[in-house]
Image (cartoon, rainbow, N blue to C red):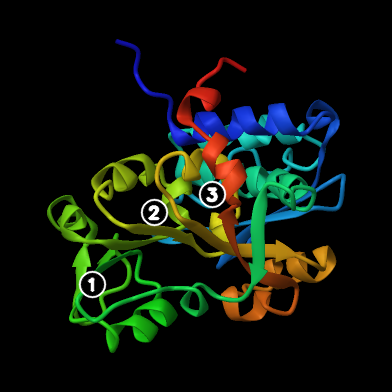
Amino acid sequence: MAAQRRIVDDLLFCLKRDIPSANEIMVKEACLGLGFTGVRLSTGHVGLCHSLQSETSLQCCQILKRAGKLAGSSALSLAGLIKSWDVSERVVGAATLNAMCQIILRNSSHRYDVVDGNLVDHLDVRQDDTVAVVGNIRPIVTAIRSRVENLYVFERGGIADEGVLPDVASEELLPQSNIVIITGTAIANGTIDRVLDLSRGARYIALIGPSATVMPDPLFARGVSAIAGVIVTDDEKAMQIVAEGGGTPQLKAATRFVVIKAKMVHSARLGVSSLNQKP
C-alpha cells in the first residue's frame, strides 16, 4: 500500500499545476528577520513565514549556509526547501511557497470565498465546545478563553504562559477537541500532517497566521474548514517590516488579513485523489 503524500508535496504540486510560468519565476529578495522571514519574487509577490528562532540551530555565526545565494535563485527551487530537514531552510522554503501561492490566491476568486477580517470574526464557538489552539497565539487564546469551558493551548518551547501545555500533550488531547486552530508554522516545522491526523474528529479546523497563507486545496481536502492568513498589499513595506524585526501587529500596515474558505461548488469537486496525481 502506497504511503499517502504529505501536504508539502501536494502544495509544491499545486504550484506547478496552477502557475503556468512557475519555472520562470525568480527570487528577487530574501530576508531572514528576527520575527518573520520574507521572500519577494520577480513578480513582486511577497511571502511570509515565522522565523522559528526557538527551533533554529545557530552554527557558529551563521543561520543559513545558502546566505548570499538566495536572491537570483529559481522560486520553485527555494520553495522545495520546505522538504529540508534543516529548520532554517524549511522557513525559507515556506516563505517562498507562500509568495507563489499569493499569485494563485489573487486569481482564484471563482474557487474560494475570501473575506476580510480575523478568524475570531468568523468563528462559531459554543460554550460547551472543547477548543484546541496549536501554537500559543495569544490574541486568539484571549478572545476564546472567556467563550468556552474547555480550552487547550499547546506550544513547542520558548513561551511558557500559564495554562500552556507542551506540544506533546496534543497527542492525547487533540482527538478530544471539536474545534482546532493551528498556527501556520506547523507547515514550516513539519508537524501539520500529524496535527491534522489527530484532529480528524473536529467539526471545525482552521489554520491561522501570515505563515498559513498557502494554496488551500491540500488543506481543504484533509478537513481544514478555513485559512486565516494575509494578502500582502505593499511588497516594499512588508519587506522593510521583516528586515526591521516586525511581527504580525506591524505587518497590518502592509497586508490584508483574510479568511479563505472553499466555495461549495469547488468544495464538492475537491478530493485528495485529484491531488495525489504525479506532478
Residue 255's x, y, as percent? 72, 71
Q: Do callouts 2 and 1 mark residues in contact (Cβ within 8 Å)?
A: no
Secondary structure found at label 3: loop
Residue 207 vertical placement versus 136 (above, below): above
Q: Residue at x 46, y 44 (%)?
A: 87
- The three-letter amino acid code for the residue at tag 1 is Asp
Position of 97 with respect to 51 (left or right) is: right
Q: Residue at label 1?
A: 129
Q: How much space separates mark 2 and mark 3, taking CA atoms?
A: 11 Å
**What amino acid is labelled 3 in the image?**
Ile
In this rendering, position of residue 222 left or right of residue 151: right
Foreground disc of the pair 2, 3: 2
The alpha-carbon separation of the residues under discs 3 and 1 comes to 42 Å
In the rendered structure, which disc, 3 or 1, sits on the residue that comes first in sequence?
3
Q: Nearer the viewer, mark 3 or mark 1?
A: 1
Write down the quadrant of residue 69 in the picture: top right
Residue 37 screen position, x and y as percent:
62, 57
Left or right, residue 63 beside residue 176: right
Secondary structure under tag 1 reads loop
* Distance Cα–Cα, label 2 vs label 1: 32 Å
Image quarter of the C terminus: top right
**Amino acid at the residue labelled 2:** Glu
Residue 141 in percent (x, y) is at 35, 79
Mark 2 Cα within 10 Å, few/some/many (few <14, many 20+)? some
Of the numbered discs in the image, which one, if any, rests on residue 63?
Answer: 3
Where, by quadrant of the figure, is residue 164 drawn? bottom left
Q: Which mark is residue 55?
A: 2
If you read the primary sequence from the N terminus, does the residue marked by circle 2 or circle 3 appear first?
Answer: 2
